[in-house]
């Protein structure tokens, strides 16, 4: 499964980074990107494309860029030696107080707040290591104040987002519209519940990209260009040109 593969990549990334630390060979901290998105803007696809572009530019002595998306909670549970079945209690949404309380009473899982806190701690840990792209879960807020971060937000008109979701999930436009509304509300509630913040607040982001005007490829190029302009990555390869008379 793709999720299993992405977890293996996440684990390999951390294993390499910790080996550098343990052996005293850890390099300077690299940059990181957080990506918040409206549903139907292609956030996961963009994160992967940004990673591919950055890895093509990466020198062999630097760790590969790794995306943490759906694999983030699985990695947190693995770190905490907790059952992978707990992942269902941690959607990118606030869990109802009744469901959370029942689970804690019967010993099904630790406090929801504890699990979210551990997920936030992992995001800060990843940001501190650098060369990661973290998608969703209020990652921009969890890592606020960590150096070398670029906090990105994707938006798009509802009609475009509905069409994207309909194509991606094989839904009708009405179904896609309902899905996007529900997902957006869930993400808004998650950020409000656990960070006491508004997901739509532009002050929480460094760059807001309207995907009505970008393809996944051109948006990835934009992010790479911004990282370069800020001195976070090596200079882009120069393009040779011939001078006229």
Image (tube, rainbow, N blue to C red):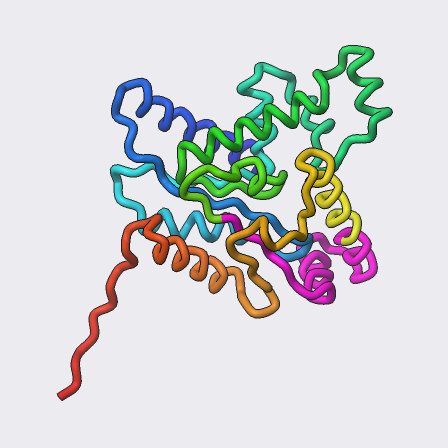
Q: Looking at this rendering, what residue extends furthest in the left direction?
A: 245
Above or below: residue 64 compared with residue 98: below
Residue 7 versus residue 200: which sits nearer the camera?
A: 200
Q: Is residue 48 left or right of residue 26?
A: right
In the image, is residue 168 part of the stretch drawn in magenta? yes
Residue 1 in view here: no
Residue 135 versus residue 197: which sits nearer the camera?
A: 197
Q: Please give the name of the residue rendered at 73% of the width and 49% of the height, measured from the top-left corner.
A: 184
Q: Please give the name of the residue rendered at 61% of the width and 68% of the height, measured from the top-left corner.
A: 212
Residue 187 in view here: yes
Above or below: residue 82 compared with residue 230: above
Q: Please give the name of the residue rendered at 50% of the width and 31% of the height, measured from the top-left corner.
A: 124
Q: Position of residue 200 (x, y in %)?
A: 67, 52
Q: Quadrant of residue 245?
A: bottom left
Q: Position of residue 148 (x, y in %)?
A: 40, 43
The magenta-colored residue range is 151-180
């Amino acid at each position: 499964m793709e999720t299993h593969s992405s977890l293996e990549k996440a684990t390999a990334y951390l294993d390499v980074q910790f080996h550098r630390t343990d052996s005293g060979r850890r390099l300077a901290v690299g940059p990181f990107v957080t990506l918040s998105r409206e549903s139907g803007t292609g956030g996961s696809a963009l994160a992967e494309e940004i990673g591919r572009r950055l890895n093509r530019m990466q020198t062999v002595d630097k760790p590969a860029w790794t995306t943490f998306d759906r694999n983030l909670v699985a990695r947190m549970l693995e770190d905490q030696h907790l059952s992978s079945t707990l992942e269902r209690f941690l959607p990118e949404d606030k869990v109802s107080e009744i469901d959370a309380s029942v689970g804690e009473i019967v010993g099904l899982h630790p406090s929801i707040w504890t699990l979210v806190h551990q997920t936030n701690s992992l995001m800060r840990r990843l940001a501190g290591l650098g060369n990661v792209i973290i998608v969703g879960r209020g990652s921009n807020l969890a890592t606020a104040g960590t150096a070398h971060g670029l906090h990105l937000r994707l938006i798009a008109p509802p009609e475009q987002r509905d069409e994207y979701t309909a194509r991606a999930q094989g839904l009708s436009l009405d179904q896609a519209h309902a899905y996007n509304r529900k997902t957006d509300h869930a993400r808004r509630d998650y950020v409000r519940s656990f960070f006491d913040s508004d997901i739509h607040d532009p002050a929480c982001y460094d760059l807001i990209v309207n995907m009505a005007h970008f393809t996944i490829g051109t948006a990835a190029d934009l992010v790479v260009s911004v990282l370069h302009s800020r001195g976070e990555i090596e200079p882009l390869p120069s393009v040779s040109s011939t001078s006229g008379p």
